[in-house]
Image (tube, helix red, strand yellow):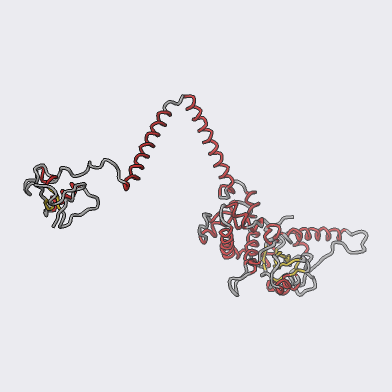
Amino acid sequence: MVFSCCAFGCRNRKGSKANLSFYRLPVEEARRQRWIRAINRRAWQPSVCSRVCSDHFLQGQPAKLYDDTNPDWVPSVNLGYKRRTAASPAHKPKYQKRRKLLKEDESDEDVKSVQTELKSEAIREMEVETDRLTEDISLLKDDIAALTLNEAFFQEDNYRVAFYTGLPSFLVLTHVVSFVSPFLEATGGLSAFQQVVATLMRCRLSLEEQDLAYRFCVSAPTMAACFRTVVEVLHARIGSLVQWPSRAELLRSAPVCFQEAFSGKAAVILDCVEVLIHRPGNVMARLQTWSPQKHQHTVKVLTAASPRGLILFLSPAWRGCVSDSYLAENCGVTDNLLPGDVVLTGTGLDPAGSVGLLRTELTPQGTKQLTASAVSDTRRLLDICLYLQEVTGRLQEEYTILKGPLDLDFLTRDGPEKPTLIDKVAAVCCALMNLSPAVVV
């Protein structure tokens, strides 16, 4: 069998030169690993046929096993490490990369040498410019923080709270947030406070989802999902604020003019709220939502309020084609009325229904001069009409989302017995109204 040397770069083969010997790699593990490291071939493991020739030993042969201090205990001569004088094509990229790194190091040294030659005036100018830029960045950060709709934005300004949310103060806003925050998760980087504020801003100012998305730096789908989630939680948590009190509580909270005009009788104010919606695609839906009063497609809800503006009752949303009187007679508000209760209405409701609505005239027709008692009665009725004007239409003025127009998604239900989104939004708006100060004329 013809043996060849396994040392790197060695071309010796058996019979190629005289007095040339070949030796196996040692069996003893420690010495064998020393030989493999000395041969130094990448990713190489010797086989049973691997041999090392005598040219790689000082005395032409390896030392004995026990003579581990002998230089020839491990091959050490002509191992081929320095035989390459030029890079092979396979190694050219490696040397090119190394040359590039060396050039970059040289250029860095040149830059450092140039920097050391800068004059002190140039250094001072750079420091002044750095200070100016740092100050500008600080001012920009302050401007961004001032425009971010978070707790700090509302904390010191109750007028700002009332404008954006309809609530009277920051304290009331924080109470509402703390009441619902355990049921809200962070969405799109928005905190529970920001989610509630965004929802109240849409109810209060009727802002579009895209507008709110720009203000809170999120996407429009994220804001739409956030609005639905917060409305669901608010409806479940504060919807119970809309409830009918006892007659004694109604009488106790009534203004003086109502107590004098309707002594011993509870008075409530009915108001029919029409919410504009977009034109449905279905022909039957268009007929059912067409309002003869508004001459547009609407849905209707009926509210019952105390003279102080506290909302006592909210009906589910009805089709716009239904008359106000029919809605008042069939929405369930009559179940809360007791015999002798006085019901005041706006201009849209018919006083001849089964609710027993009451209308009054300020001055009798044909009377040229009023008596003293008539003047007193007229002033009392005028005060009542002022309260009536303040209470009716107040819900849509405070929360303009109920003016519309709303998408048809607000009319869909999650289940056959579940309320629509417009029902939940209206209930939330009524509950928030009850957190506002009472009406005072």
| Residue 96 vs residue 286, the one in the foreground | 96
- Quarter of the picture containing the C terminus is bottom right
| Lateral position of residue 211 relative to residue 259, left or right | left
Camera-side residue of 206 and 285: 285
Q: Is residue 19 above or below residue 179?
A: above
Q: Position of residue 379 (x, y in %)?
A: 82, 58
Residue 11, percent across and down?
A: 19, 48
Residue 88 placement (x, y as % from top left)? 30, 45
Report the residue at 40% width, 28% height from top.
113
**How many numbered marks are there?**
0
The answer to whether residue 270 of the structure is visible from this angle is no
The answer to whether 356 is drawn above or below residue 88 in the figure is: below
**Looking at the image, can residue 189 be seen?**
yes
Of the 4 image quadrants, the one containing the N terminus is bottom left
**Is residue 32 rendered to the left or right of residue 322?**
left
Q: Residue 108 appears in which quarter of the rendering?
A: top left
Residue at point 50%, 59% (across, down): 185
Residue 380 in picture, x, y percent from top left? 80, 59
**Front residue of 336 and 416:** 416
**Residue 409 lies in quadrant:** bottom right
Residue farthest top in this picture: 120
Q: Nearer the viewer, residue 130 or 145?
A: 130
